């Protein structure tokens, strides 16, 4: 794992450099760079260890704070602030931002922080490489598919849209002999603050978790212009012993797996846990209620947070399960401009 150490005084971090190398880290040292993004693009570190003060500046600017802000504005790289002045940082922190105050034993504390994050950092770095590779492959395949004669200024938007869709499909190819983990149904954090069908929401005051059942097209998810004033939701509850007994959920793994693969357990739908956000849930599709659309849309009246969006095709499975109970299908509006022009122009020159 490659670590970039930024400090104005190499002597003050020599011991840390030695410790990094002794712990099998590949360490690069730099003084305060003029352009941190350019340096990061050049070295591609997996993590950065950053001092705050640059004693070579006449006014002893807190140069590291500016570098820290630039890193988080333009890149995502795990960052350890390693300085005698960590009290100058007044942010609330982040799981991938750490703070170690220079002093006796600080080298080991810094190594400990990196070791604790090592597996997660390596996974993130691998993900970045895979996404970059995916983008390169997609752009190459889409352009080659249409050929040089099929690309001009009139269809650049089409190429961009097809490339984006191809990226999503490419990433969805999960190369494994086993089934995808249940958590893979989620898009989280949600794409934006506007609700969609099968979003999981939480009341800010009561903590009640609910599942949205109103079609996305009625919610105005794409154009932010909802067609409805009320949103249909189903209350969710954790799978407790009482819930297991009520739904006759077996403790036999094979029988339980079959029922969960069906998604619908009678009038209930099972919802996988999402880390610390919520445990395994069930939602009763027959016992639904309505909430005000403004309570879940951005604005001063908002009373709910969107915890996660359930992705296709699982979103559609929930919709179909609801339709089988009490619902109706909804479809979004499409932009048919290109298709209309193509149909109109057909036969004109024949």
Image (cartoon, grey):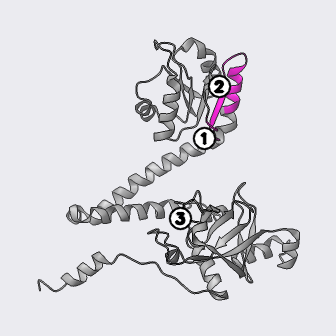
Q: Nearer the viewer, residue 107 or 58?
A: 58
Count neighbours of disc 3 (C-alpha within 10 A) and say few if under 14, some if 14 to 19, many if 20 or more: some
Residue 148, visible in the rendered structure: yes
Q: Nearer the viewer, residue 330 or 43?
A: 330
Instruction: Specify whether residue 103 is painted magenta.
Output: yes
Q: Up-down: is 141 above or below 31?
A: below
Q: What secondary structure is marked by label 2?
A: helix
Tag in front: 2 or 1: 2
Q: What secondary structure is marked by label 1?
A: helix
Q: Up-down: is 281 above or below 92?
A: below
Is the C-beta separation of discs 2 and 1 under 8 Å?
no
Tell which circle, 2 or 1, labels the residue nearer the N-terminal end.
2
Instruction: Specify whether residue 196 is painted magenta.
Output: no
Q: What secondary structure is marked by label 3?
A: loop
Tell which circle, 3 or 2, labels the residue nearer the N-terminal end.
2
Circle number at residue 16: none
Q: Which residues are magenta?
A: 91-113
Q: Nearer the viewer, residue 101 or 31?
A: 101
Q: Nearer the viewer, residue 144 or 303?
A: 303
Rounded to the nearest angstrom, the CA distance separating label 1 from label 3 is: 31 Å
Residue pointed to by mark 1: 121
Residue pointed to by mark 3: 194
Q: Up-down: is 7 above or below 39?
A: above
Q: Is residue 338 left or right of residue 298?
A: left
Rounded to the nearest angstrom, the CA distance separating label 3 from label 2 is: 37 Å
Quadrant of residue 89 within the rendered picture: top right
Count neighbours of disc 2 (C-alpha within 10 A) and say few if under 14, some if 14 to 19, many if 20 or more: few
Residue pointed to by mark 2: 87
């Amino acid at each position: 794992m490659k670590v970039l150490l930024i400090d104005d005084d190499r002597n003050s971090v020599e011991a840390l450099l030695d410790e990094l190398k002794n712990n099998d880290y590949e360490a690069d040292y730099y003084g305060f760079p003029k352009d941190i993004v350019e340096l990061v693009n050049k070295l591609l570190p997996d993590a950065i260890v950053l001092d705050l003060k640059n004693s070579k500046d006449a006014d002893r600017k807190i140069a590291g704070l500016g570098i820290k802000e630039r890193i988080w504005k333009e890149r995502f790289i795990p960052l350890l602030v390693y300085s005698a002045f960590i009290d100058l940082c007044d942010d609330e922190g982040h799981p991938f931002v750490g703070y170690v105050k220079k002093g006796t034993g600080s080298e080991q504390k810094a190594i400990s922080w990196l070791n604790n994050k090592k597996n997660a950092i390596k996974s993130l770095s691998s993900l970045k490489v895979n996404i970059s590779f995916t983008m390169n492959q997609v752009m190459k395949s889409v352009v080659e598919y249409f050929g040089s004669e099929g690309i001009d200024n009139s269809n650049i938007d089409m190429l961009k849209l097809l490339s984006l869709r191809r990226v999503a499909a490419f990433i969805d190819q999960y190369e494994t002999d086993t089934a995808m983990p249940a958590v893979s149904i989620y898009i989280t954090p949600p794409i934006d603050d506007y609700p969609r069908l099968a979003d999981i929401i939480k009341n800010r005051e009561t903590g009640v978790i609910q599942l949205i059942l109103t079609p996305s097209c009625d919610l105005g998810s794409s154009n932010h212009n909802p067609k409805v004033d009320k949103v249909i939701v189903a209350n969710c509850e954790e799978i407790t012993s009482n819930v297991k007994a009520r739904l006759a959920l077996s403790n036999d793994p094979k029988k339980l797996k079959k029922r969960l693969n069906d998604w619908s357990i009678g009038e209930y739908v099972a919802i996988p846990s999402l880390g610390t956000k919520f445990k395994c849930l069930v939602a009763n599709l027959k016992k639904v209620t309505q909430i005000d659309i403004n309570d879940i849309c951005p604005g001063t009246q908002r009373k709910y947070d969107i915890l996660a969006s359930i992705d296709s095709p699982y979103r559609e499975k929930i919709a179909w399960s609801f339709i089988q109970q009490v619902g109706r299908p909804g479809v979004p509006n499409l932009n048919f401009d290109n298709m209309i022009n193509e149909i109109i122009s057909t036969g004109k020159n024949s």
